[in-house]
Image (cartoon, helix red, strand yellow):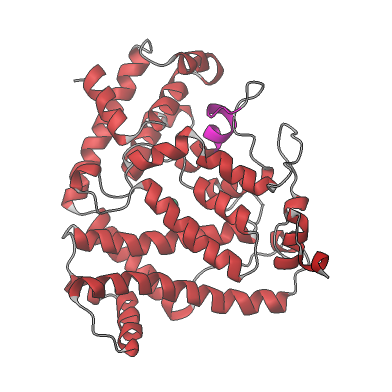
C-alpha cells in the first residue's frame, strides 16, 4: 500500500503530478556534453542549481532593473525582479500542472544576460557592436551559459539542458526560429511582464516619479480598486498601495489561469510535441489585456522616459561608449580569459562581452580607473 504513494523517483513524481502537455524530465533532449543522471535531482533541478551557483546570477544583485542604486534601496534590482518572476511563474506552472523545475530554471535564467544599467546599457552596447553583430541581453544569456561561465575543466559553459537553452533562444528570436515555446517558457514570459508592470508602478510611486492620482486614471488600476473595494477592508495609505500592487499581479494570474486552464483541458494535448505545433500563447486576455497594454504605455511615457531616468540613461550610455572605446584602443587591462577570447570572437565582441558581465558598481570603478 505504502509503495503506491511513495513517488520516490523524479519520473514517478512527475507522472503523478504533471499534465500530459508538460515537459517531463525524462523527455529532455539532454545536454551538449553528456553527463550521467543525478541520483535524486531531475535534469531541470540541476539546471536551476547551476544557474543559481553561477557568477552571472550572483551579479544580478548589483545590476539595476529600472532605477539605479543611488536612487535608494527600496526598489527592485535585477535579482529581486528575477525572484519575483520565478515565484509568480511557479505559481502558474503548478496550477497548470507544468514542470515547475523547468519553469524555475527558465525564470532564474531569463535576465541573466542583462548588462550594467539595464536597457540603457543594452542599447549602448548594441551601438558599440553595431558593425560586429550587435548586442542583445537575451543572446548574451546564451553566451554566458555556453561559453563564459565555467563549472567543469573539460568544457566551457554550464552545460544546461537543451530545453532551457531553447527556451532562452525563443526569447532571442520570437518569430523566425520556427520553434513554438514550451508552456513552461510561456508562463515565464507571462510572469515577467506581470511582474515588471506591478513592481515598476510600486517603485515609481515610492520614488515620487508618478502620483497615486495619475495611476488611478489607469484602467488596470480601476479594475484593481474595484476588487479591493469588494473586500471591504479599511486600509491605511501604505497598506492600500501594497494591496494595489498585489492585486495587479493577482488579477493577472487569475485571468491567465481562468483562460489557459479550460483551453488546455479542451485541447487535450497528449505531449509537449502538441504544444510545439500550436500557436497558442499563454497570457492575459480580454479587457484586462487591454488595460495592461495601456498601463505599459503609461509606464513607458511617464516612468521609463521620466527626465530623472533619461539623465541616468544618457550618462550610462556615454560611459559605456567611452569604456568600450578605451578597451578597444588598448585591451591590456582585460582579464586574461577575455584577452584570449579576442582570437576566438574578435576584439570588439570580447570587449563587449567583458563589459556586459559587469555589475553597475564594477562598471563605474572601471570607468573611473580607465577613462576619467
Ligand atoms: Mg525580466
With 173 as the anchor, is 12 left or right in this view? right
Q: Is residue 146 magenta?
A: yes
Residue 325 visible at all: yes
Provide the major secondary structure of the magenta segment.
helix
Q: Residue 224 appears in which quarter of the rendering?
A: bottom left
Quadrant in which the C terminus appears: top left
Q: Is residue 364 magenta?
A: no
Q: Tell me if residue 211 comes above or below residue 349 in the rendering.
A: below
Taking depth in this image into account, of 261 and 54 the one nearest to the observer is 54
Where residue 294 sits: x, y (%)? 34, 70
With 286 as the anchor, is 225 left or right in this view? left
Taking depth in this image into account, of 286 and 81 the one nearest to the observer is 81
Number of numbered discs on residues: 0
Where residue 180 sits: x, y (%)? 65, 56
Q: Residue 207 appears in which quarter of the rendering?
A: bottom left
Q: Tell me if residue 40 comes above or below residue 270 in the rendering.
A: above
Q: Tell me if residue 109 comes above or below residue 187 in the rendering.
A: above
Where residue 59 sits: x, y (%)? 40, 37
| Residue at the limit of the structure toward the front, as seen here | 2
Residue 19 visible at all: no
Quadrant in which the N terminus appears: bottom right
With 219 as the anchor, is 99 left or right in this view? right
The residue lying at 51 percent from left, 17 percent from top is 341
The residue lying at 23 percent from left, 49 percent from top is 73
Q: Which residues are magenta?
A: 142-151
With 201 as the anchor, is 46 left or right in this view? right
Q: Tell me if residue 165 comes above or below residue 275 in the rendering.
A: above
The residue lying at 61 percent from left, 43 percent from top is 47
Taking depth in this image into account, of 251 and 168 the one nearest to the observer is 251
Where residue 253 sits: x, y (%)? 48, 72
Q: Residue 158 appears in which quarter of the rendering?
A: top right
Amino acid at each position: 500500500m505504502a509503495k503506491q504513494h511513495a513517488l520516490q523517483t523524479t519520473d514517478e513524481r512527475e507522472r503523478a503530478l504533471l499534465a500530459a502537455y508538460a515537459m517531463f524530465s525524462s523527455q529532455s533532449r539532454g545536454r551538449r556534453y553528456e553527463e550521467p543522471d543525478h541520483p535524486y535531482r531531475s535534469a531541470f533541478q540541476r539546471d536551476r542549481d547551476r544557474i543559481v551557483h553561477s557568477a552571472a546570477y550572483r551579479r544580478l544583485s548589483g545590476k539595476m532593473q529600472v532605477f539605479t542604486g543611488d536612487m535608494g534601496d527600496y526598489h527592485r534590482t535585477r535579482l529581486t525582479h528575477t525572484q519575483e518572476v520565478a515565484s509568480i511563474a511557479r505559481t502558474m506552472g503548478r496550477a497548470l500542472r507544468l514542470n515547475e523545475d523547468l519553469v524555475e530554471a527558465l525564470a532564474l535564467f531569463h535576465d541573466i544576460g542583462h548588462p550594467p544599467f539595464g536597457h540603457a546599457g543594452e542599447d549602448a552596447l548594441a551601438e558599440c557592436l553595431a558593425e560586429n553583430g550587435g548586442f542583445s541581453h537575451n543572446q548574451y544569456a546564451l553566451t554566458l551559459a555556453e561559453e563564459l561561465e565555467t563549472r567543469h575543466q573539460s568544457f566551457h559553459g554550464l552545460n544546461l539542458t537543451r530545453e532551457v537553452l531553447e527556451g532562452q533562444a525563443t526569447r532571442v528570436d520570437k518569430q523566425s526560429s520556427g520553434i513554438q515555446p514550451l508552456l513552461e517558457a510561456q508562463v515565464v514570459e507571462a510572469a515577467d511582464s506581470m511582474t515588471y508592470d506591478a513592481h515598476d508602478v510600486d517603485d515609481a510611486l515610492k520614488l515620487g516619479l508618478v502620483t497615486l492620482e495619475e495611476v488611478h486614471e489607469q484602467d488596470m488600476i480601476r479594475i484593481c480598486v474595484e476588487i479591493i473595494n469588494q473586500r471591504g477592508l479599511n486600509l491605511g495609505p501604505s497598506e492600500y498601495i501594497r494591496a494595489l500592487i498585489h492585486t495587479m499581479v493577482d488579477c493577472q494570474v487569475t485571468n491567465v489561469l481562468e483562460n489557459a486552464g479550460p483551453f488546455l483541458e479542451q485541447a487535450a494535448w497528449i505531449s509537449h510535441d502538441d504544444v510545439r505545433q500550436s500557436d497558442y500563447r499563454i497570457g492575459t486576455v480580454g479587457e484586462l489585456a487591454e488595460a495592461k497594454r495601456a498601463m505599459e504605455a503609461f509606464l513607458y511615457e511617464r516612468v521609463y522616459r521620466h527626465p530623472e531616468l533619461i539623465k541616468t540613461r544618457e550618462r550610462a550610455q556615454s560611459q559605456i561608449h567611452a569604456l568600450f572605446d578605451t578597451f578597444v584602443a588598448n585591451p591590456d587591462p582585460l582579464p586574461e580569459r577575455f584577452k584570449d577570447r579576442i582570437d576566438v570572437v574578435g576584439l570588439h565582441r570580447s570587449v563587449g562581452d567583458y563589459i556586459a558581465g559587469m555589475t553597475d558598481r564594477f562598471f563605474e570603478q572601471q570607468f573611473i580607473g580607465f577613462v576619467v
